[in-house]
Amino acid sequence: MTALLGASSPALEHEDYNKDNWTSLDEVEHQIRTFRTCRGFQSPLVVECWTKFGQDDAIYLFDFQLHCYVLLWIAKEQFAYIADGANLFKTNKELRDGIKWALGKPKLIPLSFDQQTAVDHCGSSAVLVALTMMNLYKTKDFTQLIVSPRLRAMVTSRMHKFPSQKLDSRSRFKIKHTCSRCNKNFRTRLQLVTQQRKSPGCAV
């Protein structure tokens, strides 16, 4: 039996979710394979469920406490970028420590994804994060994960066909420029680049 995932907050009670919208890592992987055939998402990166970190750059899907995390592994430098639809890795220290331990305590750099719209849509968010990581991998610019409203609607409608509770919208869709090294936020892209030039340790 394939385990389902969809939880976007450990604090929510089970009745806040519509489990008809939950999905599996296999389905997330399938949807990524489907969309990566489109022009713009073609990439040499392998996408697979995590069992261990390999010797080549790759994208891994990782299920932890009913929530899906996406990792972009940079083999040469031995670290991974990590993101999830509800930004739980960035905001929940207990979960963050648990994930690091489960993955073997690698260096993990969190990225923000602020475009999930419902509490049980972490599966579609994982697809969107993975597709965006493929694009950013080409430019090596991992300052922000942003997808078009059209793509978000397309992926969400394919994976979640039932009503669900809305995710807190206070931070959604607010464009931020975050340094992936020091996690400082900047109002403009120019401010971010200027900071990175002044501080070599912040350069991506």
Image (tube, helix red, strand yellow):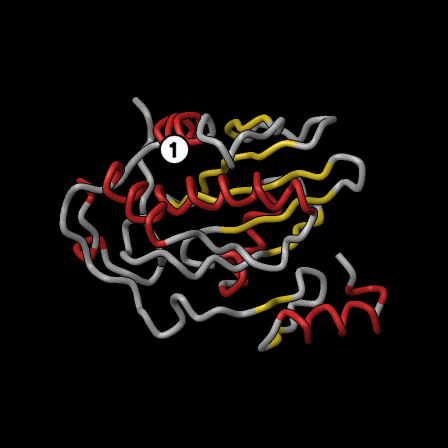
In what quadrant of the picture does the C terminus appear? bottom right
Quick one: which residue is furthest to the front in this view? Answer: 39
Label 1: element kind: helix
On the image, numbered disc 1 is attached to which residue?
Answer: 28
Q: Is residue 11 above or below residue 99?
A: below
Pick the residue in front: 189 or 200.
Answer: 189
Q: Is residue 28 above or below residue 119?
A: above
Taking the spot 48% from the left edge, 69% from the top edge, the residue there is 175
Pick the residue in front: 65 or 165.
Answer: 165
Taking the spot 33% from the left edge, 63% from the top edge, the residue there is 11
Find residue 193 and report its horizontal and vertical position in percent: 73, 68
In the shown orientation, is residue 101 left or right of residue 106?
Answer: left
Quick one: which residue is furthest to the top in this view? Answer: 1
Taking the spot 62% from the left edge, 59% from the top edge, the residue there is 143
Find residue 135 and report its horizontal and vertical position in percent: 57, 42
Amino acid type at mark 1: Val
In the shown orientation, is residue 93 left or right of residue 189?
Answer: left
Q: Is residue 184 above or below residue 51?
A: below
In the shown orientation, is residue 42 left or right of residue 24?
Answer: right
Name the image quarter holding residue 71: top right
Pick the residue in front: 28 or 89.
Answer: 28
Taking the spot 55% from the left edge, 55% from the top edge, the residue there is 96
In the shown orientation, is residue 36 left or right of residue 142?
Answer: left
